[in-house]
Image (cartoon, rainbow, N blue to C red):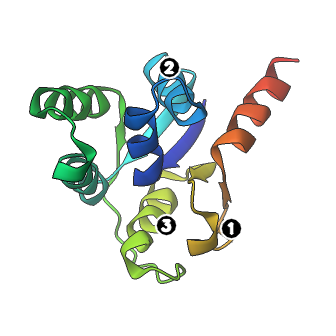
Amino acid sequence: MIRVVIDTNVLVSALLQPEGLPAAVWMLAFSGRIEPCLSEDILTEYEEVISRSHFRCDTEIVAATIRAIRKIGRYVKPTKHADGCSDPDDNMFLECAEAAHADFIVTGNQRHFPAEWKKTRVIGVRELIEILIQQED
């Protein structure tokens, strides 16, 4: 199974546009097609960001989303510090990817990340879906 670390912006986009490609990534995770890798820092950020008032997500939807992600996620405890991102707040995704031996980091903001981190490629949502389609052929 493909292991992925999913950037917070993909979760936000999925909640704001339930018919879009970011939502499809989460549906792939919930259906077991990909394995989302998480650390406590990432889960904390997910909850903090989607709870922001300007996203207008109902508190019950936020709680249910976090519960669902907790259920399907592969938890890791990063032990190495990373400093490869232009935005230091994004380094937690690199750290998680390294600890989980993730295949991909999926983000809507590739410019903040290096193209690769250790053995993990940083890709966009569309590229992940294209890779999965190619695997089915």
Expressed as whole percent of the image width and height from the top left, the position of residue 92 reads: 38, 67
Task: Specify whether 100 is left or right of 71.
Answer: right
Expressed as whole percent of the image width and height from the top left, the position of residue 26 reads: 47, 29
Q: Quadrant of residue 12?
A: top left
Q: Amino acid at mark 1?
A: Glu
Task: Specify whether 105 is left or right of 48.
Answer: right
**Label 3 secondary element:** helix
Which residue is the site of mark 3? 94
Please report whichever mark, 1 or 3, sits nearer to the chain's N-terminal start.
3
At label 1, counting other C-alpha atoms closer than 10 Å, the crowd grade (few under 14, some 14-19, many 20 or more) is some
Q: Amino acid at mark 2?
A: Gly
Task: Specify whether 124 is left or right of 105.
Answer: right
Expressed as whole percent of the image width and height from the top left, the position of residue 117 reads: 62, 69
Q: CA distance from mark 2 to mark 1?
A: 25 Å
Looking at the rendered image, the quarter that the C terminus falls into is top right
112 relative to 104, above or below: below
Q: CA distance from mark 3 to mark 2?
A: 22 Å
Expressed as whole percent of the image width and height from the top left, the position of residue 72 reads: 35, 27
**Label 2 secondary element:** loop
Looking at the rendered image, the quarter that the N terminus falls into is top right
Please report whichever mark, 3 or 2, sits nearer to the chain's N-terminal start.
2
Q: Quadrant of residue 130?
A: top right
Which residue is the site of mark 2? 32
Query: Residue sitting at 11 percent across and 27 percent down?
Result: 60
Q: Nearer the viewer, residue 32 or 9?
A: 9
Which residue is the site of mark 1? 116
**Label 1 secondary element:** strand
Query: Residue sitting at 44 percent across and 52 percent down?
Result: 9
47 relative to 118, above or below: above
Q: Nearer the viewer, residue 111 or 81?
A: 111
Q: CA distance from mark 1 to mark 3?
A: 9 Å
Query: Residue sitting at 68 percent across and 67 percent down?
Result: 116
